[in-house]
Amino acid sequence: MQIGILTIGLFLPEAQSLKDKRQVLESLIATSRRKFNISIAEIADMDRHHQATLGVACVANNRRYVNQVLDNVVNEFENCLTAEVSTIEMEFL
Protein backbone atom coordinates (compact mmCIF):
# COMPACT_ATOMS: atom_id res chain seq x y z
CA MET A 1 0.00 0.00 0.00
CA GLN A 2 1.29 3.44 -0.95
CA ILE A 3 0.20 6.63 0.79
CA GLY A 4 0.94 10.04 -0.66
CA ILE A 5 0.65 13.16 1.47
CA LEU A 6 0.57 16.61 -0.07
CA THR A 7 0.62 19.90 1.80
CA ILE A 8 -0.34 22.95 -0.26
CA GLY A 9 0.00 26.51 0.99
CA LEU A 10 -2.33 28.96 -0.73
CA PHE A 11 -2.52 32.74 -0.92
CA LEU A 12 -6.04 34.09 -1.47
CA PRO A 13 -5.59 37.69 -2.67
CA GLU A 14 -9.28 38.47 -3.16
CA ALA A 15 -10.53 37.15 0.19
CA GLN A 16 -11.55 40.13 2.33
CA SER A 17 -12.93 38.06 5.21
CA LEU A 18 -12.95 34.53 6.58
CA LYS A 19 -16.33 34.07 4.91
CA ASP A 20 -14.79 34.88 1.49
CA LYS A 21 -11.96 32.46 2.23
CA ARG A 22 -14.39 29.71 3.23
CA GLN A 23 -16.39 30.11 0.02
CA VAL A 24 -13.27 29.78 -2.15
CA LEU A 25 -11.89 26.82 -0.19
CA GLU A 26 -15.19 24.93 -0.08
CA SER A 27 -15.40 25.14 -3.85
CA LEU A 28 -11.78 24.06 -4.37
CA ILE A 29 -12.07 21.20 -1.88
CA ALA A 30 -15.35 19.85 -3.28
CA THR A 31 -14.08 20.01 -6.86
CA SER A 32 -10.81 18.27 -5.94
CA ARG A 33 -12.58 15.49 -4.05
CA ARG A 34 -14.87 14.74 -6.98
CA LYS A 35 -12.25 15.05 -9.69
CA PHE A 36 -9.36 13.14 -8.07
CA ASN A 37 -11.00 10.89 -5.41
CA ILE A 38 -8.73 12.20 -2.64
CA SER A 39 -9.07 13.19 0.98
CA ILE A 40 -8.52 16.93 1.44
CA ALA A 41 -9.00 19.38 4.30
CA GLU A 42 -7.80 22.73 5.60
CA ILE A 43 -5.13 21.96 8.21
CA ALA A 44 -3.59 25.34 9.16
CA ASP A 45 -3.90 29.12 8.85
CA MET A 46 -7.58 28.94 9.70
CA ASP A 47 -7.70 32.43 11.23
CA ARG A 48 -5.97 34.20 8.33
CA HIS A 49 -8.23 35.30 5.51
CA HIS A 50 -5.47 35.62 2.90
CA GLN A 51 -3.75 32.30 3.61
CA ALA A 52 -4.73 28.65 3.75
CA THR A 53 -2.90 25.37 4.14
CA LEU A 54 -4.54 22.25 2.75
CA GLY A 55 -3.61 18.65 3.46
CA VAL A 56 -4.24 16.07 0.74
CA ALA A 57 -3.97 12.28 1.02
CA CYS A 58 -4.12 9.61 -1.66
CA VAL A 59 -3.92 5.86 -1.08
CA ALA A 60 -3.33 3.21 -3.75
CA ASN A 61 -1.30 0.07 -4.35
CA ASN A 62 1.00 1.74 -6.90
CA ARG A 63 3.36 4.60 -5.95
CA ARG A 64 3.49 5.87 -9.53
CA TYR A 65 -0.30 6.24 -9.58
CA VAL A 66 -0.28 8.09 -6.24
CA ASN A 67 2.43 10.43 -7.50
CA GLN A 68 0.48 11.07 -10.70
CA VAL A 69 -2.73 11.91 -8.80
CA LEU A 70 -0.93 14.30 -6.46
CA ASP A 71 0.87 15.96 -9.39
CA ASN A 72 -2.52 16.47 -11.07
CA VAL A 73 -3.87 18.03 -7.87
CA VAL A 74 -0.92 20.43 -7.77
CA ASN A 75 -1.48 21.35 -11.43
CA GLU A 76 -5.18 21.98 -10.75
CA PHE A 77 -4.35 24.35 -7.89
CA GLU A 78 -1.63 26.12 -9.89
CA ASN A 79 -4.18 26.81 -12.65
CA CYS A 80 -6.78 28.11 -10.19
CA LEU A 81 -7.74 31.76 -10.69
CA THR A 82 -8.93 32.43 -7.13
CA ALA A 83 -5.85 31.18 -5.24
CA GLU A 84 -2.10 31.25 -5.72
CA VAL A 85 0.07 28.31 -4.65
CA SER A 86 2.76 29.50 -2.23
CA THR A 87 4.22 26.20 -0.97
CA ILE A 88 4.11 22.55 -1.94
CA GLU A 89 5.37 19.59 0.08
CA MET A 90 4.92 15.99 -0.99
CA GLU A 91 5.90 12.81 0.82
CA PHE A 92 5.23 9.09 0.49
CA LEU A 93 4.78 6.45 3.17
Image (spheres, rainbow, N blue to C red):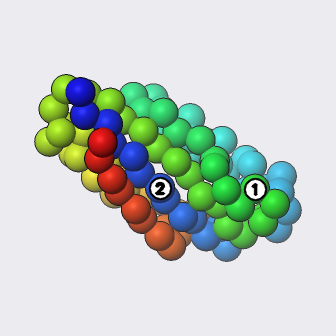
Query: Which circle marks residue 65 in the picture?
Result: none
Whether residue 83 sits left or right of residue 19 in the image: it is: left
Q: How far apart in space, not on screen, are marks 2 and 1 (Cα)?
A: 15 Å
Whether residue 87 sits left or right of residue 26 in the image: it is: left
Image: 84 above or below 73: below
- Front-most of residues 77 and 38: 38
Image: 56 above or below 45: above
Amino acid type shown at disc 1: Met
Q: Which residue is mark 2?
A: 7
Query: Which circle marks residue 46 in the picture?
Result: 1
- Front-most of residues 8 and 34: 8
- Secondary element under disc 2, as helix, strand or loop, is strand
Circle nearer the N terminus (2, 1) = 2
Would you say residue 72 is visible in this rendering?
A: no
Image location (x, y in percent) of residue 28: 56, 46
Which residue is depicted at the point 67% across and 67% down? 51
